[in-house]
Amino acid sequence: MPRRLKIGNFEPATPLLLAPVAGYTDLAFRLVARSCGGVGLACTELLCPEGILRQTAASVRIAQTNAADAPLVTQLYGANVESLCEAARWAQDQGTAVVDINMGCPVDKVTKFNGGSKLMCDPDQTVRMVERVRAVLTRTPLTAKMRLGWDETCLNAPLLARRLEEAGVEAVTVHGRTTEMKFTGQARLDGIAEVVAAVKHIPVIGNGDIRSVAAARRMFEVTGCAGIMIGRGAIGMPWIFRDIHADMTTGVVPPKPSIEEICQLMRDHFYNMCRFERERSAVCEFRKRISWYAKQLNPCTRLREEMRLINSTADFERAISAFLAWRHERDEQMARGKVDEMIEAA
């Protein structure tokens, strides 16, 4: 069934969100995911408020966007109330559609400074912080992304979500794991469902382990959430939003992109990186990204090996072209083999 997601006065075109994944969901990738269709909202990677206010090179790069990268969620992390307020005001002035406070990152370098999911450990202080940030946003919705809790002894997401709603947060995203779990085990849909039941009016967005249309269906059906957020499941498979949206609206899932189409997405991604970074940086970064796309191109050992040796745009093109030529030759040989088998059988 068609679903609507409304965050305050803002309603994205679809209830499907691209999650912030540090080191992966930069502008270059977001544009690729959007080009495939189905993305209602995309999030920046985690932004340090102090870095934004000082306009450090790293923060400017992470915050980079353009007209094609809209609507956009600016996600902030940290525990310094003054910095969060100033950064939220900055994001609003930049025209972001939504400001999000990260309360779910389990990474030690974030939590040891009381940011990310550590915010869930002191609900009273976190709610006071949210009230301050909400007060500086005059026209932009404020949301929060959290986990089920810190560990099995502190599964406080339902209570915190209800309190955040009272403090003015206009949507919450829940990753179905605890901080202690990080990315191990399976996302707990029942825990997300408890948050859906706990809030009164605001939408809850489910997150965790969505790597297929079936998994998205199950997230909606089991939790009753209003939208879903996909992170790792979209890296290397950016057309997943297209597939889920088609299933939601027509009941028909498009065929998987062809090898040629996937290679074109890789090209788009690589040349986006070249546009927004130096060529050398794009080359070095894409050597790491190939492993994600490779999962959709098997067998592709040759491509992985050649891509990890690239040193220029020309090397990138040679690797892609050689792989496509090899796949076409392999497919033709397999087709001829099947014809020979049929002749022999006859």
Image (spheres, rainbow, N blue to C red):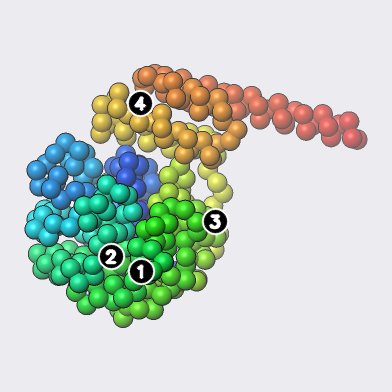
Report how far apart the C-alphas of labels 3 and 1 lie in the structure: 39 Å
Residue 181 shows in this picture: yes
Read off the residue under disc 3: 253
Of mark 4 and mark 1, the one earlier in the sequence is 1
**Residue shown at 20% from the left, 72% from the top:** 124
What x and y, as percent, mark residue 107?
Answer: 32, 49
- In whole angstroms, how far apart are the C-alphas of marks 4 and 1? 43 Å
Left or right? Give the position of 71 relative to 208. Answer: left
List x then y, in percent, for residue 342.
84, 34
Q: Determine the CA span between mark 2 and mark 1.
A: 9 Å
Query: Which label was assigned to residue 50?
Result: none
Q: Which residue is mark 1?
A: 154
Judged from this view, the residue extending furthest toward the right is: 346
Q: Residue furthest front?
A: 153
Query: Which marked residue is nearer to the observer: mark 2 or mark 4?
Result: 2
Q: Are marks 2 and 1 in contact (CB under 8 Å)?
A: yes
- Front residue of this view, candidates 290 and 56: 56
Q: Does dot 3 land on a helix, a strand or a loop?
A: loop
169 vs 274, nearest the viewer: 169
Q: Circle 4 — which element?
A: helix
Is 313 on the left-hand or right-hand side of 58? right
| Mark closer to the chain start, 2 or 3 | 2
**Residue 234 to residue 117: above or below:** above
**Contact check, label 4 and label 3, Cβ < 8 Å:** no
Residue named by callout 4: 283
Which residue carries the number 2 mark?
120
What's under tag 4, amino acid-wise? Val
Q: As shown in the figure, which amino acid type bears the numbered disc 3?
A: Val
